[in-house]
Amino acid sequence: MRDFVSARARTIPPSGIRKFFDLALSMEGVISLGVGEPDFSTPWNLCEASIYSIEQGGTSYTSNRGIQKLREALSVWLSDHYQLTYHPDTEMVITTGVSEGLDIAIRAVTDPGDEVIVAEPSYVSYAPCVTLAGGIPVPVQCREEDHFRLNPDHLMEVLTGKTKAIIINFPNNPTGAVMRREHLRALADIIIDHDLLLISDEVYSELTYSGKHVSSAALDGMWERTITLNGFSKAYAMTGWRIGYLCAPQELCDAALKIHQYVMLCAPVMGQVAAFEGIRRGEDEKDRMVQEYRVRRNLFVEGLNRIGLRCHLPEGAFYAFPSVQKTGLSDVEFAEQLLKEEHVAVVPGSVLGQGGENHCRCAYAVSRKDLAEALRRMEHFIADHGRE
Amino acid sequence: MDEKDLLLLRLLEENSRLSPDDLGIMAELSPDDVASRVTALEEGKIIKSYTTVIDWERAANEGVAAIIELKVNPERDFGYDRIAGRLANFREVRSLRLITGVYDLQLLVTGKTMQEVARFVSEYIAPMDRIRETATHIIMKTYKENGQNFFEKESGERIPYSF
């Protein structure tokens, strides 16, 4: 029989943590700092709105773009919060999570051979999505000495005549780094000078602890060359509902919408209804959760530094990204042995791309009690393995 | 009162046993700053007391609690305040509020038995001057108290890793 798997599917790497996943599932009493999602349940009023809608028979397809009133509300919300102007009828698509938004954005702009720069360490989907679209992912490393921001000089080093777009994600998964306005401006100038497109994944935007989130498309000269991706998963604790959105100038948005209507048709209606309630009446609950993440960040990062795992203060998202160098173990060894010996799950940084080596990603979206226990176990682990 | 004060209040409301050191880390303040802020909140009577939320049903306590509603004739110059002040002196009265609606005052009363609560209401509360009518509601089950949900929650299954 022929080998039916495509060369492209073969090219993309398998998950870097499959074996950890299976190991953790076979263990008792694991504290997982490995999950990139809130530990809160979706605020109850959002669930109620969705349940009520289902009871009323709201179970059908929506328009390809998504429910009109949700897009209208989002358009106002984005303008109020991030000074972004996107027309709900022509410049916006509700997607099945940011994951889908990312895929259709990349496919809408990538031709075979196009180079797409991916700021790493990062969420694992960016490079594979570029590959699947026929493009060539080009990593650029965000370094610890730059507080894991994208340094414009390093970006310049990887630009070629084939570079078409850049994918960034700030506040960042896995480092918690935030690009403030001045950092984004420096980046924007290069993007404009070299006539590039920016794909900006801002799904952690509401989880910004140092001032207000700055959206790339709100910078002068950037709106027309930016695809903004965002969603409800992180800020509204709605990961399982799968609701995101893509915003872009009409021509780009239309291209993405075409792909969306062929591969997805529409985002799940139940999630769209919950998201609409979130935009209308979810702010207080969201702010309460964000305040709690900030408290946990302070506790956890202080704890990491206290037990000797050097960690910069992340300004956003819900990840700490400490260095494990002190232990003399590689990040993969650290994560594996920590799981086996102390039953604490963390993600080794090297599976998250360049610049992740010797670090591990710890999601502090777990209760304060579990965070304290995880720190206690990690301290014990370091006492056994620490090399001075 | 600033944002940091509000955060301290929220943290203490949830767990009043947090140390100034822990509170300082959480709220991005020095322990001394925490101590002086908390003292000011105590002196300003914003923090009234430090208490513990107990699920008495689970503690197998035989006690009974009732919500008592009262219709009251207010007094010239004093309104409801003087009668409320007298009611508040009873140890059995755990909380007391002036409310809108059909009734004026609402009390939470506790006792060892239903008879004890009934006797307290009929002997001490109902006969007081200016009280026109009482309604006693025995509490059968508490589902939520002071923001604490007493439901055993089956939290959804969470996977150990995701990117």
Image (cartoon, rainbow, N blue to C red):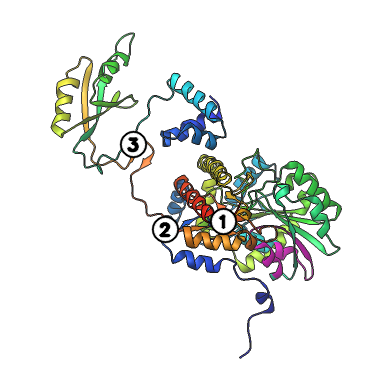
Q: Amino acid at mark 2?
A: Gly
| Residue that sits furthest to the front in the current view | A388
Q: Amino acid at mark 3?
A: Val
User: How far separated are the C-alphas under marks 2 and 3?
Assistant: 27 Å
Marking on residue A258: none
Say left or right for A187 vs A345.
right
Discs 2 and 1 lie in a common subunit:
yes
**Front position among marks 2 and 1:** 2
**Front position among marks 2 and 3:** 2
For residue A90, say whether it is visible. no
* Mark 3: secondary structure: loop
Q: Is residue A334 magenta?
A: no
> Which class describes the residues within 10 Å of circle 2: few (<14), some (14-19), or many (20+)?
few
| Residue that sits furthest to the top in the current view | B77
Q: Nearer the viewer, residue B23 or B113?
A: B23
Say left or right for A193 vs A236.
right
Q: Nearer the viewer, residue B13 or A310?
A: A310
Vertical side of B123 occupied by A326: above or below: below
Residue A140, image quadrant:
bottom right
> Horizontal and vertical percent for residue A183?
76, 45
> Which residue is tagged 2?
A29
> Horizontal and vertical percent for residue A43?
47, 47
User: How far separated are the C-alphas under marks 1 and 3?
Assistant: 38 Å
> Which residue is tagged 3?
B53
Q: Amino acid at mark 1?
A: Ile
Residues rendered magenta in the picture? A106-131
Which image quarter holds the N terminus of chain A? bottom right
Do residues under tags 2 and 1 come within 8 Å of each other at their CB atoms? no
